[in-house]
Amino acid sequence: MTASENTPALSSIAKAVFAHDKLSIGITLPITRENQSAVDFTEQIALARLADQLGFRAVWVRDVPLNSIDYPDPVGHLDPWVLLGALASNTQNIALISGAIVLTLRHPLHVAKGAISVDALSRGRFILGVGSGDRPPEYAAFGRDPDGRRDLYRQHWATLAEAVNVPSRVIPDRAPEGAPEFYLLPRQNASIPMLAVGSGGQSVDWIARHSLGWMTYHREPQAQRGRYSMWRAAVDRAAAGAFRAFGVAMRLDLSDNADEPATDVPLGYRTGHRALVALLHDMRESGTHHVTLNITSERRPARDIIEEVAAHVLPAFHR
């Protein structure tokens, strides 16, 4: 099987988020202030509805199974499948993306069932982003060996890909004599696109062969250009001339001064909207196809920031 045969064609929702020579913009939930732990998820769903109405292309949801005193993110995240189900029922057009389901800590058939369920509720608007997790103590809590996560990620990816593809195929862990042939319901109309979020311990060549694209975190521009060049070379080795997307999660502290120049903050920028447009144009020229904004602000309501980005930034990219 060739690399292009191994990777399903992009669905319509994947094409809306990831397109050659274009940049799309999404948001990541929940949107919180620094060190905020309690989250009003009714408000978060309202923010997703607003982003949908204003033309953002995607809303991303994280998977944080367990919290601990030494984990830097204090937020009480909802189970991603529960939140994605609520978002599917409260939005109309925006893509729903898991960023990312911890594939090594969940059984791939459970992940497949969740993905098919969200895709059905959202009428085909789901993109399945998966990762490997990076906290050894969390592996121990689930009885997993962190040293085996690379192999486990590949094994789970293979089982999951068969289950969410069309035609769907269930690969059981064990099949004793006389066991029935299992299948997943509801039946899918189209394959669910799978996206590598982070490396999962894999080479870029493996990701280029198996994933619709590669989602990574913000780096300073020169490093990110090098990252994209490495990705493009891997894609050309896997399937010369094929399109594989490259996306970035970027923190945004949007100033109420539209002309404030961009300054670095951890994993992103503080900036006014005019400099943000210039930054995003540079990212597109450097090879990025999608940016999801991790919005943060101690001074401004999230709704105001979403509305300002929609009014002054989206028109430059979402034509």
Image (spheres, rainbow, N blue to C red):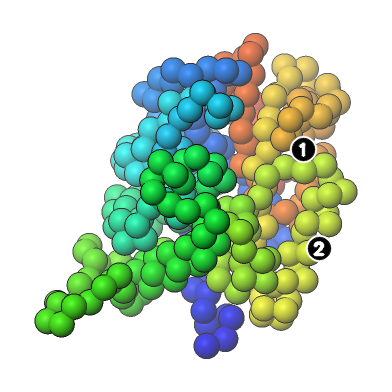
Q: Provide the secondary structure element on which disc 2 rests.
A: helix
Q: Secondary structure at mark 1?
A: helix
Image location of residue 111, percent across then percent down: 35, 56
Residue 76's spot in the image, x, y percent?
43, 26
* Residue 115 appears left or right of 296: left
Residue 198 image position (x, y, % from top left) = 61, 52
**Dot placed on the residue nearer the N-terminal end, 1 or 2:** 2
Residue 229's mark? 2
Q: Residue furthest left?
A: 178
Nearer the viewer's eye, disc 1 or disc 2? 2
Residue behind mark 1: 277
Could you say which is closer to the camera, residue 57 or residue 144? 144
Which residue is outermost to the top?
299
- Mark 2 is on which residue type? Ser
Is 84 left or right of 242, judged from the image as shown?
left
Q: Residue at x 61, y 33 (%)?
A: 294
Q: Who's the residue at 34% across and 44% down the image?
A: 81
Is label 1 in contact with label 2 (beta carbons under 8 Å)? no
Query: Is residue 13 shown to the viewer in this render?
Result: yes
Front one among 52 and 300: 300
- Residue at horizontal 30%, vertical 70%? 173
Q: Is residue 189 above or below residue 45?
A: below
- Give the image quarter of residue 237: bottom right
Residue displayed at 51% across by 79% down:
6
